[in-house]
């Protein structure tokens, strides 16, 4: 399960920040993760306000933690934080402090969008590097809120959504395809959803590039309610477990 949690959190955290946000301060999302039928852990996202570099920012806090039988053999304690400038809706700072079964990363990214550059402060290895980024680069968390600002009513079957996400020391071209619309059953009731496919790299973790499917609410929230992935070994599911303070009400039905 090496890097498995960072991948599933990436899907949760990467489904666009525009000048009008379909989220608000105080929003809280919690997801329950299952690995091949076992309770694997939880992932949470919370939106807060913050001041950074004397500017008003959204501070997004994402956490992932393994639990139950999975934690006994694979401990996960992940923390991600993104500071998003409210005036430009671009990330200014990103914190990545993770522990995944002995694999650790402790990095801080400082974005300079004017220079198309990011400073990577690797606290674990005590080194600093500078990497080039495209003008529209997002971090892992800001991409999630960025994509949620697309106009859901205009999404059609066959459409693609693209994001440039900087993580580690390079920019990833993240791509999702709209597969259609479905009524999805959740613990809160049934809800209209948009079915989406994130394209992933096949091989070590995923069976093939089309191994992942996600369902997001077909409304202005565009909140993921279910993600499933076929892995080389086993399968993974993430389901919306708790939510608070969404900007718009979600229409669940029995």
Image (cartoon, rainbow, N blue to C red):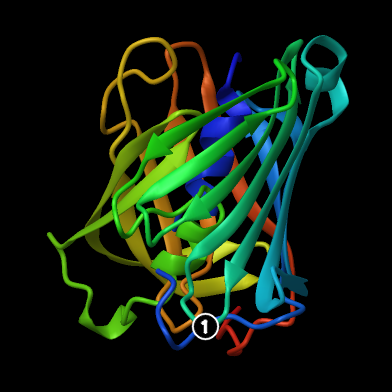
Q: Residues within 10 Å of mark 1 (few under 14, many from 20)?
A: few
Residue 242, by quadrant, is: bottom right
- Horizontal side, residue 226 vs residue 219: left or right: right
Percent from the top left, x then y, of residue 235? 51, 25
Percent from the top left, x then y, of residue 217? 46, 72
Residue that carries the numbered disc 1 in the rendered image:
87
> Furthest-front residue in view?
115
Q: Residue at x 47, y 40 (%)?
A: 228
Q: Which of 43 and 249 is in front in this view?
A: 43
Q: In this view, does 235 lie above or below 12?
A: above
Judged from the image, the secondary structure of the residue bearing numbered disc 1 is loop
Residue 219, by quadrant, is: bottom left
Percent from the top left, x then y, of residue 50? 77, 73
| Image quarter (top left, top right, bottom left or bottom right) of the N terminus | top right
Q: Residue at x 83, y 21 (%)?
A: 71
- Horizontal side, residue 77 vs residue 177: left or right: right
Residue 38, by quadrant, is: top right
């Amino acid at each position: 399960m090496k890097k498995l949690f960072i991948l599933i959190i990436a899907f949760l955290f990467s489904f666009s920040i525009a000048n009008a946000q379909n989220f608000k301060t105080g929003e809280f999302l919690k997801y329950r993760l299952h690995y091949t039928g076992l309770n694997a852990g939880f992932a949470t996202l919370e939106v807060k306000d913050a001041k950074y570099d004397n500017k008003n920012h959204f501070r997004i806090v994402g956490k992932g933690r393994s639990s139950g039988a999975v934690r006994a053999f694979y401990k996960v304690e992940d923390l991600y934080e993104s500071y998003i400038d409210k005036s430009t809706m671009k990330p200014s700072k990103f914190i990545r402090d993770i522990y995944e079964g002995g694999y650790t990363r402790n990095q801080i990214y400082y974005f300079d969008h004017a220079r198309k550059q990011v400073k990577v402060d690797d606290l674990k290895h005590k080194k600093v590097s500078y990497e080039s980024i495209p003008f529209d680069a997002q971090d892992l968390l800001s991409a999630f809120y960025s994509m949620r600002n697309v106009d859901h009513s205009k999404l059609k079957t066959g459409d693609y959504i693209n994001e440039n996400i900087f993580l580690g020391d390079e920019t990833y071209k993240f791509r999702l395809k709209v597969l259609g619309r479905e009524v999805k059953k959740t613990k809160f009731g049934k809800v209209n959803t948009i079915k989406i496919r994130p394209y992933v790299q096949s091989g070590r973790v995923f069976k093939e590039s089309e191994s992942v499917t996600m369902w997001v609410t077909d409304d202005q929230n565009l909140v993921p309610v279910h993600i499933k992935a076929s892995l080389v070994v086993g399968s993974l599911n993430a389901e919306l477990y708790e939510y608070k303070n969404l900007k718009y009400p979600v229409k669940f039905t029995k």
